[in-house]
């Protein structure tokens, strides 16, 4: 697989502070951009992260088409090897592979950003969220006056597909945010069975998840490329496993990098709820499809969730 070159250009290097959990919404202090390759399209793409007003949320803008797509679970149009958003007015207008940038923004506690991209896919960079966290740190984080809204899981919701499942349960206390636990099983000895649980905070996201790269089995690469996918994949942006061997010259960044990346993906997929989640996420062999089905099942059941500040709003009224 051919290597690729990517450049990071930053508008301003500003030391940002991460807002305290649940206190207020946040955005970037300044705009920042990067250039990279789409993992599946193989196309060169430029992306810019721009500050946005309170209550704006995360919105993707296709600058080549002049169309906006909000980062919401019900606009997910495809989940084969990536999470793909589509414009409901024209489903051919898409933004693919949004999970890593969504994970970085959610993991760093950022609520409002306009993401401009001049093509159909987010750049893969190094295959993890590390470069995206770097961009966020360079731009800086700015607190906003509007209170941060949180979706509280009130009762268990579960989806499954054969021997895989994903579920959300209520948090153990009102002080908890989102707890995640994932287990995976692969026949390749280099992966095998791995499991990990994390209480999501900006610190734990950076330390435990952000550097974990996407991965692929060597035996699948020709099939994926024949299907028009993984056109931009390389050992520079993905871990490739051949049975018991990791083909990347530098090896793994951590022994259980595979399950850590699956959790990173889950953070990004769950961020499409449109607000922070308070609850406990548990999954076995879950991927983008099950993660999205889980959010759809949660939000379709009015008894399964509520806005966490509902009681405070009612008292104030």
Image: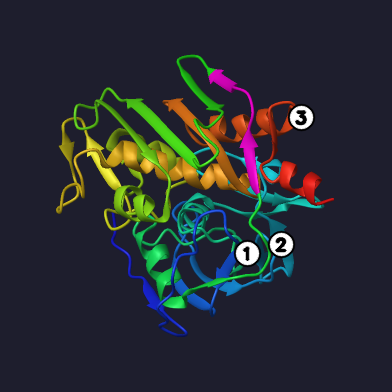
Point out residue 35 in the picture as x, y percentages from the top left corner: 45, 72
The dot on residue 55 is 2
Q: Residue at x 74, y 27 (%)?
A: 301
Segment tinted magenta in the rendering: 150-160
Image-quadrant location for residue 131: bottom left
Q: Contact (CB < 8 A) between labels 1 and 2?
A: yes
Describe the element under mark 3 as helix, strand or loop: loop
Colour mode of the rendering: rainbow
Instruction: Tell me how far mark 3 sits from mark 1, CA to CA.
Output: 25 Å
Instruction: Tell whether position 55 is magenta.
Output: no
Instruction: Tell whether position 152 is magenta.
Output: yes
Instruction: Tell me how far mark 1 sits from mark 2, CA to CA.
Output: 7 Å
Q: Main secondary structure of the magenta part?
A: strand
Q: Nearer the viewer, residue 207 or 174?
A: 174
Local crowd at mark 1 within 10 Å, few (<14), some, or many (≥20)? Answer: many
Point out residue 124 in the picture as x, y percentages from the top left corner: 42, 58
Q: Residue at x 54, y 79 (%)?
A: 31
Q: Contact (CB < 8 A) between labels 3 and 2?
A: no
Q: Nearer the viewer, residue 240 or 307?
A: 307
Can residue 222 be seen from the camera position used here?
no
Q: Is residue 40 above or below residue 26?
A: above
The dot on residue 207 is none
Point out residue 284 in the picture as x, y percentages from the top left corner: 42, 24
Q: Earlier in the sequence, mark 3 or mark 2?
A: 2
Describe the element under mark 1 as helix, strand or loop: loop
Residue behind mark 1: 112
Describe the element under mark 2 as helix, strand or loop: loop
Q: Is residue 176 above or below residue 19?
A: above
Q: Earlier in the sequence, mark 3 or mark 1?
A: 1
Residue behind mark 3: 302
């Amino acid at each position: 697989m051919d290597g690729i070159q990517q450049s990071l250009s930053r508008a301003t290097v500003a030391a940002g502070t991460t807002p305290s959990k649940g206190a207020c919404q946040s955005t970037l202090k300044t705009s920042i951009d990067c250039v990279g390759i789409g993992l599946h399209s193989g196309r060169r793409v430029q992306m810019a992260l721009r500050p946005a007003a309170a209550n704006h949320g995360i919105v993707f803008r296709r600058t080549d088409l002049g169309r906006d797509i909000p980062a919401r679970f019900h606009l997910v149009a495809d989940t084969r090897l990536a999470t793909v958003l589509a414009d409901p007015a024209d489903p051919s207008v898409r933004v693919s592979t949004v999970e890593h940038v969504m994970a970085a923004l959610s993991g760093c506690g950022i609520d409002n950003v306009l993401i401009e991209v001049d093509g159909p896919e987010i750049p893969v960079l190094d295959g993890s969220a590390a470069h995206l966290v770097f961009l966020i740190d360079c731009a800086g984080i700015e607190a906003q006056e509007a209170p941060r809204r949180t979706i509280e899981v009130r009762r268990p919701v579960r989806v499954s597909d054969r021997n895989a499942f994903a579920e959300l349960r209520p948090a153990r206390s009102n002080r908890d945010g989102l707890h995640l636990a994932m287990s995976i099983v692969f026949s390749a000895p280099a992966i095998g069975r791995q499991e990990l649980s994390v209480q999501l905070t900006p610190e734990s996201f950076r330390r435990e998840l952000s550097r974990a790269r996407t991965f692929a089995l060597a035996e699948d690469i020709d099939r994926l490329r024949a299907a028009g996918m993984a056109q931009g994949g390389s050992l520079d942006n993905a871990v490739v496993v051949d049975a018991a061997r990791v083909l990347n010259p530098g090896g793994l960044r951590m022994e259980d990098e595979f399950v850590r990346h699956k959790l990173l993906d889950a953070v990004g997929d769950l961020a499409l709820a449109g607000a922070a989640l308070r609850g406990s996420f548990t999954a076995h062999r879950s991927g983008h499809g099950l993660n999205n089905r889980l959010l759809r099942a949660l939000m379709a059941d009015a008894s399964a969730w509520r806005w966490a500040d509902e009681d405070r709003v009612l008292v104030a009224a």
